[in-house]
Structures are given as structure tokens and as C-alpha cells.
Image (spheres, rainbow, N blue to C red):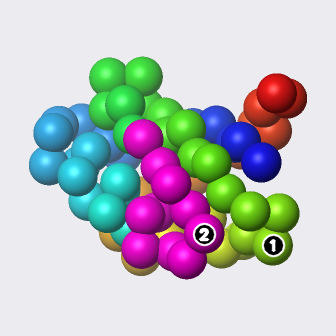
């Protein structure tokens, strides 16, 4: 499953690393963060919930504004 997370509060490369590290620390998640677009593209298993992704981003100090499911 692929999702696009719109994230508030990212402003620099350091933010990019923090969010990407937090998301990738969730088992079953592979994330790529784009600080310029203020989003993260996430590939994850169907067992990963939106709440799991939101919690990881919040623990890094940022806020998820929206989660969009991407159809393959």
C-alpha cells in the first residue's frame, strides 16, 4: 500500500532526516520524505494503520495534516 502524508512543520534537511527516520523505524514501512513539498511517500503493509504513521511523525515533533492513499 502506498500513502502520501502531508506534514506540517518541516522546514530544513534536518527535519527531513528526523521524519524519515521516525517513519522508517516502524516495522513494515519504507518512507521517502520531501521537505520542500512538505510530504512523505510511504510504502507499507496493509497492517500499518494511519494512526501508526501519525504517531511516528508526532513522536518526531511534527504534525500530519492529511493522508492520501495512492492507487497503484
Question: In this rendering, would 26 be left or right of 10?
Answer: right
Could you say whether the residue bearing mark 1 is in a helix, strand or loop?
loop
Q: Which residue is mark 1?
A: 47
Q: Which is nearer the N-term, disc 1 or disc 2?
A: 2
Please tell me which residue lies in front, 24 or 66. 24
Membership of 42 in magenta stretch: no
Most foreground residue, 45 or 19: 45
Per the model, the C-alpha gap separating discs 1 and 2 is: 8 Å
Q: Nearer the viewer, residue 54 or 26?
A: 26
Q: Is residue 41 left or right of residue 62?
A: right
**Is 59 displayed left or right of 41 in the figure?**
left
Mark 2: give few (<14), some (14-19) or many (20+) Cα within 10 Å.
few
Q: Quadrant of residue 69?
A: top right
Segment tinted magenta in the rendering: 23-32
Q: Do labels 1 and 2 touch, CB within 8 Å?
A: yes
Which residue shows up at 60% across the image and 69% down it?
A: 28
Give coordinates of residue 36: x percent, y percent: 32, 23
Q: Is residue 62 above or below residue 7?
A: below
State whether residue 2 appears in this view: yes
Quadrant housing residue 33: top left
How many marks can you see? 2
Question: Crowding near pointer 1: few (<14 within 10 Å), some, many (20+)?
Answer: few
Image location of residue 16, percent across then percent down: 27, 45
Residue found farthest to the top: 37
Q: Residue at x 37, y 31 (%)?
A: 34
- Which circle marks residue 28 in the picture? 2
Element under label 2? Answer: loop
| Residue 64, horizontal then vertical, whole percent | 57, 52
Residue 42 locus on image (x, y percent): 58, 46
Mark drawn on residue 22: none
Amino acid at each position: 500500500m502506498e500513502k502520501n502524508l502531508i506534514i506540517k512543520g518541516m522546514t530544513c534537511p534536518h527535519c527531513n532526516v528526523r521524519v524519515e527516520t521516525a517513519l522508517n523505524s516502524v516495522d513494515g514501512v519504507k518512507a521517502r520524505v520531501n521537505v520542500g513539498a512538505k510530504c512523505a511517500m510511504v510504502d507499507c503493509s496493509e497492517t500499518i494503520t494511519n494512526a501508526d504513521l501519525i504517531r511516528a511523525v508526532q513522536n518526531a515533533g511534527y504534525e500530519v495534516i492529511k493522508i492520501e492513499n495512492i492507487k497503484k
